[in-house]
Image (cartoon, grey):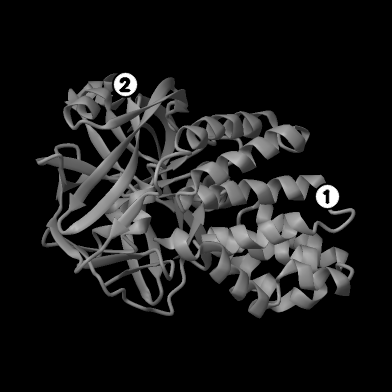
């Protein structure tokens, strides 16, 4: 699908946009140090929309290499994966002298992510190997471990056809919330109807070992480490590929699944076993999904073009740019969460306001692998806005401690936000969400 026109079309677009590095090196320009420092700081904070604005306004203050560096990252962030990998290929083939190895290593991490998203698994594995071989000291130990884990995944998938979605005339299916409030849709798979959790924050679609056997998943010879974000539980998983499955009339080919121990998907306090989770890579390839409060989920064959631009990607995690009081902040977007949760970043930034209006409480948080009780403050109400529409959420928990050391975003927006709208749309081509 996308792979057929990948490099040629991307190269033409690059040449037209003025970022094709081979044509830029000969007209080298010095960076404005203050602007580079500001843009590096903004990128480190993952303030993607601000970085986009700065690049647009101050491109002339950057050298060609730095322009390409920021442009390639933004291509990845806004789901323009063909442009991202082509820019970085150009950079690597004509690398300017003196360009910092740390920045090259950072670019390569974005490139392997874009290769994975487009199903170019062998190329992703090649970039992983390059990072491990030539740049191991340019990343921290946790990142290096993640790269080695990714190499196992990408290498195992190297001979697998790219995952592909065939929209046809689109689809209309019924969605429902299961007994614990998770959003589920039906999949047609191996002549069986399978209730499947629809989870934008599942980085890879997942399935239990029992269901992998039941649905005759093609298992790959690989195991690797995985962990549950909230609980930190570590466990071993495998990989499998479904030759085909259907969401209504939409065909998904070569869908990649993590094969999980059944116990990881068993929610002990509620005695509930989950079996199949549809994750980000398939969801993004659907391009546009519309949820209606009457229980319909529509996947249109003709996408809805809008000027709205409020969704980005942090790797395989969708991120929303939402109005919050007098600010606009970045939040993870998680259809696998029933309620919105604010992170310690929010607590630390708006500490006084939280203490003034919130009530301290122990809150139980759950996910794959178990549950965890955390100290939180409960805000009686919390307002979020898309474009000119503002909604109010009730009883929102605010964490006081970071979930992980690298936390940058302000929270995790869940289904309670979606429920405020009669129609809620995700569009991964133009990168927006909208509600009516």
Q: Earlier in the sequence, mark 1 or mark 2?
A: 1
What x and y, as percent, mark residue 324? Answer: 46, 63
Compared across the picture, whether 406 is left or right of 266 comes to right
Q: Position of residue 127 (x, y in %)?
A: 63, 43
Q: Which residue is mark 1?
A: 100
Q: Position of residue 370 (x, y in %)?
A: 34, 24
- The residue sitting at 47% across, 48% down in the picture is 316
Above or below, 406 against 426 in this view is: above
Crowdedness near tag 2: few (<14), some (14–19) or many (≥20) residues, C-alpha within 10 Å: some
* Nearer to me, 349 or 27: 27
The residue wearing badge 2 is 261
Residue at the (19%, 51%) spot, across then down: 246
Near-viewer residue (195 or 96): 96
Question: For the point 39% across and 41% down, which residue is it?
Answer: 204
- Disc 1 crowd rating (10 Å Cα; few below 14, some 14-19, many 20+) is few
Judging depth in this view, the residue of 404 and 55 nearest the camera is 55
Query: Could you say which disc has been placed on residue 328 in the image?
Result: none
Q: In this rendering, is residue 267 above or below 357?
A: above
Q: CA distance from mark 1 to mark 2?
A: 42 Å
Q: For residue 409, say whether it is visible.
A: no
| Quadrant in which the C terminus is drawn | bottom left
- Helix, strand or loop under label 2: loop
Question: At x 68% / y 28%, what residue is drawn?
Answer: 141
Q: Quadrant of residue 297?
A: bottom left
Residue 5's x, y, as percent? 49, 66
Q: Is residue 240 visible?
A: yes
In terms of secondary structure, where does tag 1 sit?
Answer: loop
């Amino acid at each position: 699908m996308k792979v057929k026109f990948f490099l040629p079309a991307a190269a033409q677009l690059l040449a037209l946009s003025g970022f094709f590095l081979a044509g830029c090196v000969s007209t080298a320009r010095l960076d404005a140090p203050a602007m580079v420092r500001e843009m590096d700081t903004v990128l480190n904070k993952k303030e993607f929309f601000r970085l986009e604005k700065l690049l647009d306004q101050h491109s002339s203050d950057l050298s060609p290499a730095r322009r390409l560096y920021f442009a390639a990252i933004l291509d990845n962030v806004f789901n323009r994966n063909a442009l991202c990998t082509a820019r970085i290929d150009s950079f690597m083939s004509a690398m300017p002298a003196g360009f910092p190895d740390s920045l090259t290593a950072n670019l390569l991490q974005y490139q392997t992510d874009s290769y994975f998203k487009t199903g170019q698994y062998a190329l992703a594995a090649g970039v992983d190997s390059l990072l491990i071989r030539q740049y191991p000291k340019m990343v921290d130990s946790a990142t290096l471990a993640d790269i080695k884990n990714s190499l196992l995944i990408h290498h195992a998938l190297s001979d697998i056809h790219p995952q592909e979605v065939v929209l046809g005339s689109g689809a209309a299916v019924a969605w429902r919330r299961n007994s614990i409030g998770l959003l589920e849709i039906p999949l047609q798979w191996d002549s069986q109807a399978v209730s499947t959790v629809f989870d934008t924050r599942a980085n890879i679609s997942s399935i239990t070992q029992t269901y992998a056997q039941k649905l005759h998943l093609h298992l790959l010879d690989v195991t690797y480490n995985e962990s549950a974000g909230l609980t930190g539980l570590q466990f071993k998983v495998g990989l499998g590929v479904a030759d085909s499955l259907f969401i209504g009339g939409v065909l998904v080919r070569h869908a990649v699944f993590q094969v999980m121990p059944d116990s990881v998907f068993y929610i002990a306090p509620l005695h509930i076993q989950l079996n199949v989770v549809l994750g980000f890579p398939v969801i993004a390839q659907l391009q546009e999904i519309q949820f209606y409060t009457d229980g319909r989920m529509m996947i249109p064959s003709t996408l809805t073009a809008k000027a709205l631009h409020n969704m980005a990607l942090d790797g395989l995690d969708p991120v929303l740019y939402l109005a919050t009081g007098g600010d606009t902040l970045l939040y993870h977007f998680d259809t696998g969460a029933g309620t919105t949760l604010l992170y310690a970043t929010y607590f630390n930034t708006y500490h006084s306001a939280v203490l003034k209006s919130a009530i301290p409480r122990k809150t139980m948080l759950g996910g794959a692998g178990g549950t965890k009780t955390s100290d939180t403050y409960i805000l009686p109400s919390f307002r979020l806005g898309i474009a000119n529409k503002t909604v109010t959420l009730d009883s929102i928990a605010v964490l006081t401690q970071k979930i992980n050391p690298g936390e940058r975003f302000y929270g995790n927006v869940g289904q309670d936000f979606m429920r405020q709208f009669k129609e809620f749309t995700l569009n991964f081509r133009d990168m927006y969400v909208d509600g009516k």
